[in-house]
Amino acid sequence: AQSVTQLDSQVPVFEEAPVELRCNYSSSVSVYLFWYVQYPNQGLQLLLKYLSGSTLVKSINGFEAEFNKSQTSFHLRKPSVHISDTAEYFCAVSGPGGSNYKLTFGKGTLLTVNP
Amino acid sequence: IAGITQAPTSQILAAGRRMTLRCTQDMRHNAMYWYRQDLGLGLRLIHYSNTAGTTGKGEVPDGYSVSRANTDDFPLTLASAVPSQTSVYFCASSVRRGNEQFFGPGTRLTVL
């Protein structure tokens, strides 16, 4: 079985400050990892993903996440946030399990960027 | 159509009524999913379909049914709605199960 823990349900920060949203997972097999973002009253959008290769992955809007296998983590970071980054962020994990590839989501972290 | 569409956008429904939420994708993805999103609980998988003609149960399937007659459509039916089914419902699809998923805009359902 696999699971995802997002350690913070809410993260308030000021504009232009750095931010880290924490995500830990558990799985007995190799995994794919994802971060999704949900803006108010919208569906989820893929922000970035780790499938294989370089452990540091980046999005087009300045977010990055690093896959750390030994710590089973995939924390999301941004060095300087904008008001427009205010949204809920979901970490998700999937992995092979016979025919049961399953995408498991964390419960989300609400990032609020204040002026 | 581009991506995934869902209908209706929102609905208020009396308890005991039957309701079908519609989902259509035009990306020719093999796998499709239905989730419900509730405050503090994140997204929970209701049902999924790996390919046309097959369906499977997710974490919270009770009270819901699905069908997958073709690649594009994946309707979710509530046979007899109850207030605990008040939620926001998201449909999603992926090339195959386990790959990144693409989400629709959601349906906000209120059961009174």
Image (spheres, coloured by chain):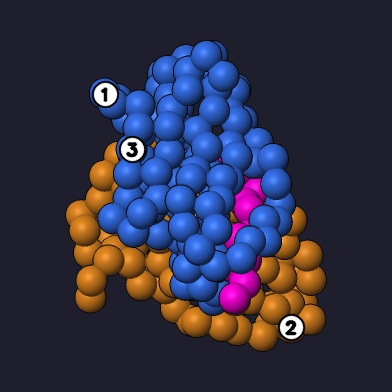
Chain colours: A blue, B orange
**Residue B14 % position (x, y):** 74, 83
How many residues crowd mark 3 within 10 Å: few (<14), some (14–19), many (20+)? some
**Residue B64 % position (x, y):** 61, 57
Quadrant in the rendering for residue B3: bottom left
Tell me if I can see residue B95 in this picture: yes
What residue is disc 3 on? A57
- Which segment did they paint magenta? A105-115
What residue is disc 1 on? A53
What residue is disc 2 on? B14
How many residues crowd mark 2 within 10 Å: few (<14), some (14–19), many (20+)? some
- Cβ–Cβ below 8 Å for labels 3 and 1? no
**Residue A106 % position (x, y):** 61, 43
Seen in the picture, residue B100 relative to A16 is either above or below; the reply is: above
Q: Secondary structure at mark 3?
A: strand
- Chain holding disc 3: A
Q: Look at label 1 and name its amino acid.
A: Gly
